[in-house]
Image (spheres, coloured by chain):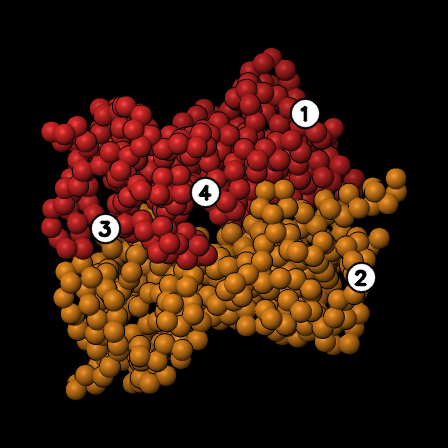
Chain colours: A red, B orange
Amino acid sequence: MNDAVLIVGAGPTGLSAAHAIASVGRKAILVEKENILGGAPIISGYAKLVPSGEWAKEAIGRMVKRVEDSKLVTIHKGAKVAKVDGQHGNFTATLSNGQTVQAGAIILGTGFTHFDSINKPEWGFGTFEDVVTTTQVEQMVGAGKIACPSDGRVPERVAILLCVGSRDRQIGREWCSKICCTVSANLAIEIKELSPKTDVFIYYMDIRTFGLYEDKFYWKSQEEYKTKFVKARIAEVTRSPDGRLLVKGEDTLVKRPIVISFDLVVHAVGMDPNELNPEIAKVFGIALEKHGFIERGEHYTGTFSTNRPGIYAGGAALGPEDIDTSISHGLGMAMRAVGELSALSQRAAA
Amino acid sequence: MNDAVLIVGAGPTGLSAAHAIASVGRKAILVEKENILGGAPIISGYAKLVPSGEWAKEAIGRMVKRVEDSKLVTIHKGAKVAKVDGQHGNFTATLSNGQTVQAGAIILGTGFTHFDSINKPEWGFGTFEDVVTTTQVEQMVGAGKIACPSDGRVPERVAILLCVGSRDRQIGREWCSKICCTVSANLAIEIKELSPKTDVFIYYMDIRTFGLYEDKFYWKSQEEYKTKFVKARIAEVTRSPDGRLLVKGEDTLVKRPIVISFDLVVHAVGMDPNELNPEIAKVFGIALEKHGFIERGEHYTGTFSTNRPGIYAGGAALGPEDIDTSISHGLGMAMRAVGELSALSQRAAA
């Protein structure tokens, strides 16, 4: 039996799992398809994370450093798992870089893919330069300046449109992306901090700042930073004669059409299943649920199990997830992997 | 150094942690203040759990049995921790039953307290017999019959009022209780399955069926089970001349007063900090956050840490939490406890 653990994906989930495996003296093999570690928060350049308020670069950076510094973690960057043979206790994985690795268990922290706003064309992304995504605004916040891409001016009025690629049957995204409401309430605060004269509007269906995010982000954004929350059904984003953008829709609270002009329109993009999931399912021999996320096994005594023994999945691979929960999933999967390998080796010894 | 782990609270979080500790051959000491194991889902008699659809008794029952059957888990029921001495690696805890236990680390899965509806008197609980809580309806579902407590009749019309003890500054509950929207959408389905002729209305501020719960519970409840979702601000619950209950409020979508009569009114009660948290904080020497939940430490490399080294907190002790996430927190805390004890013993040996 091999007691090393193969971890696929070096975002918050995989980094958390890799450190955990090493923390109990076991070998972890971390495979990441990109050439840098850190996952979406690093690759997409997130600004301050929800709910800690820490910069992604520092927070996730600490997780990366801890794993890079560990003698027990072997890292393969720019590599994918191409083939998995064997079974729980004795897996052999062939990587796309030609190498072969051995492990007793496999942890999938393969995450998600940001919704591509081009699939919601009536909301102006791809047509108007000043229609951007939350990811782009995170990058602006990181760079310390909010500006309209078309001419570099500081926007007087910004609209954040929630649920772009979420809760939308028309485009085959029925799920809610869980964290965009909170991220957007926080982003409105960050915009206001950088540019106090800018007015920020958030267009929503429901505000889903669950748990302690309610007063920490929603109320704070509204009360201290004067973010205007508009419950509306958006019809389209067009250009007004003066060159600004027009957000057209129906205010669902007063049941009247509303048309407001903005300098910058931000799509709060949702979380799609990892676009590689069909390939991941095939390579690892695991099932996907109906939306294309990885299918979960039993919830109570088999948490993080997939349908294949010895292969675990957690974080945003299972559905839209926040960073804190993803990190806890990484720890939880590491625990399951180590525990079940112990049971296997006890059975083998008996 | 002592490598046993003391776990406080035998709900989903603590049960998950106890099994995890035992799964790697370590001793777990589980202390539960009640005389039965299982936490809120068992003690309050929950029906089918969200999102698995499994009966609480079976699902959580498996977790209980696994821990009871483990030779590595020592269980103290009907006992609280009265005093904690020592430090990370060598804690000594004195229990209320007079026993003393030794452990290297402590995991707190001390959970929450259901909001007591009596603190929202204008909504009729405590005044009218047919105003009940979600917990009471869970028990009815468990018993296989939905009935009005006043006379045992099957209700023709049921109102579920969301956010009772949540998102309510007036009564000092600013937080959102995270899971009541999903639980209530599911409860409406269960009511309808038991009594197809009953009409169920859900009064809400925002529907927060985050992630994959959106179509699995909200859409399903609305589309397949005809649950009526009413966005409203409730003013009061009174009795109508015919003896039924009147829910009075303002429909915030049409900005008009609405008064509808119901046979049964259900308070979707929120999650308060465990009412014992001030005592818990004192006994364990840990901090509480402003609402009274246990304060979290660093989120990225110190997940589940409290302000006292070697003591971890997770699940609903940190804020309103769902069962699945609580179980993953239990696993994650066990991983952290084992990992940090390994590091301690390595340092001691060096």
Tell me the mark number nearer the camera, choosing from 3 and 4: 3
**Element at label 3:** strand
**In the displayed structure, would residue A268 be above or below residue A148?**
below
Q: Please, is residue A243 above or below residue B194 in the view? A: above
| Camera-side mark, 1 or 3 | 3
* Structural distance between the alpha carbons of marks 3 and 4: 24 Å
Residue type beneath disc 2: Gly
Instruction: Report the residue at 13% width, 53% height from top.
Output: A255
Q: Which residue is mark 3?
A: A231
Residue B21 is situated, as x and y percent measured from the top left of the image, at 70, 52
> Looking at the picture, does residue A306 appear above or below residue B249?
above
Q: Identify the residue at image location x=75%, y=66%.
A: B84
- Of all residues shown, which one is farthest toward the top? A98
Q: Nearer the viewer, mark 1 or mark 2?
A: 2
| Residue A212 appears left or right of B327 | left
Q: Quadrant of residue B194?
A: bottom left
Residue A252, visible in the rendered structure: yes
Q: Which mark is residue B86?
A: 2
Which is more toward the observer, B193 or A274?
Answer: A274
**Distance in Å between CA atoms under marks 4 and 2:** 38 Å
- For the point 29% across and 60% down, the residue is B205
Q: Amino acid at mark 1?
A: Thr
Q: Closer to the N terminus: mark 1 or mark 4? A: 1
Judge left or right: residue B254 versus residue B278. Answer: left
Rendering coords of residue A94 (x, y %):
60, 18
Residue receiving disc 1: A74
Secondary element under disc 4, as helix, strand or loop, is loop
> Do labels 3 and 4 touch, CB within 8 Å?
no
Categorize mark 3 by other alpha carbons within 10 Å: few (<14), some (14-19), many (20+): some
Please tell me if label 1 and label 4 are on a single chain: yes
